[in-house]
Image (cartoon, grey):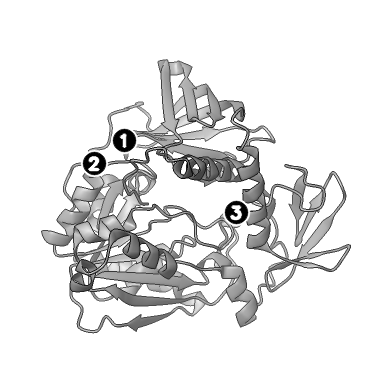
Amino acid sequence: MMINKKGDMTPFDMKKRPCRQSPFLMPVIWGASFLMTRRFGLRIKKSGIKGLKPPYLVISTHQGFSDYYIAPLSVFPRRASYVSDMEGFAAFGRMLYRKIGCIATRRFVTDVSTLNNIKYALEKNRNIVFLFPEARHSNVGTTSVLPDNLGRLVKYLNVPVVILSVCGSYLASPFWDEEHVRTAPMKAELKLLYTSEELKGITEEEASEEIGNALKYDEYRYQYKKKIRIGYKNRAEGLSMVLYQCMECGNEFTVSDKGDELFCSNCGARWVMSEYGHLVSRETGKAIHIPDWYEWERSNAADEIKNSSYRQEYDVTVEALPNEKGFVFMGGGKLVHSIDGFQLYIPKNEERLFFSSKILYTVQTEYDYKGKGKCIVLSTRDCCYYIYCGKNDFNPTKLQLLTEEIHKALKRGGRENDRVYQNE
């Protein structure tokens, strides 16, 4: 665990200009990436990029941890910069992470400094820059909510746009059980989406829509279609953190998992997870597509927030990550979630923070962060707050779905949305 022993709350210098990837570290990065993906038989296809030279922007899907190894291999032998969350700087140290080529950001936060540093890396360093706009690992092997102004970003940067789409990364290491890696084949495609000239001829809305379409994926559909067998016997363990609501009785937080099964303690319903990624009812034999269950939960969350009196309050424990020096323990606190957004009160420093639903379009979720339990992460420009709670009804997935549906409802209602693009 990365501990800030002195409790230094000095914010990380987000304005510091990025440097080019160290030529001495490039062989290490490529070698490590090759070794980490070798067991998955990674194949990378390149379409339309022959002769394309930096600078250009690569927008990548973000299914799982393997994406960090696939990205540098996809542009070999060229160096690149990677927009990365503060956690990476704390894990590897500011100096090393900068030399790897990373640009600092905080998830789902408006910060012009990050945008300026991306532009600097493209224009001054003449680099390839990687963005992972989902800013999170996929919950159920489908595309996470994307920021709605990607079109504005790419037109502002005015460099060629390339898409990196990956298959198999989630299947090998699902977000709800990343400790147990499965053996699943991986493939990736690096494809030119727009030249600089083509960008000039389209609107921001058209660019956003096409980028969104290019980033769409469904890992379980891909697994079943390609008949990718995953024989790991405990393949369903952890899935109940995502599928928290029983599809039979509708009860929340009564679904548990063990081995290859999900089961409800309220109604007794049971499902077995097949080797090809379907959940099959023990009682009826009906097969369920896992993302369909997840989207059913989303629709229920949307119904819940139609009542403007929605409000949840939790006693929580808070850790702060203000800089690369590590986490500062802030002790107990109070978290309130309502239609207006999140309110976080930290008695240790008498701090009251508000995260507006008009701006916050999703939250970072963690199911057992570094063995410390389930949490969500809320960030300001100066600090990331890791918020833990052991209560059964504190479910990161539900809080995420509620946040997304509240934001969408406010947006549909014509409320102003001044969010600026952020990325992991």
State the mark number for residue 372: none
Nearer to us of marks 1 and 2 is 1
Amino acid at pointer 3: Trp
State the mark number for residue 176: 3
Residue 232, relative to residue 89: is it above or below?
Answer: below
The secondary element bearing badge 3 is classed as helix
Looking at this rendering, what residue extends furthest in the left direction? 124
Residue 12, relative to residue 114: is it above or below?
Answer: above
* Front position in the image: 5 or 225: 225
Nearer to us of marks 3 and 1 is 1
State the mark number for residue 14: 2
Q: On the picture, is 182 further left or further right than 355?
A: right
Query: Image quarter for residue 269?
Result: bottom right
The secondary element bearing badge 1 is classed as loop
Residue 383 percent location from the top left of the image: 35, 33
Question: Dot 3, crowdedness within 10 Å: few (<14), some or many (≥20)?
Answer: many
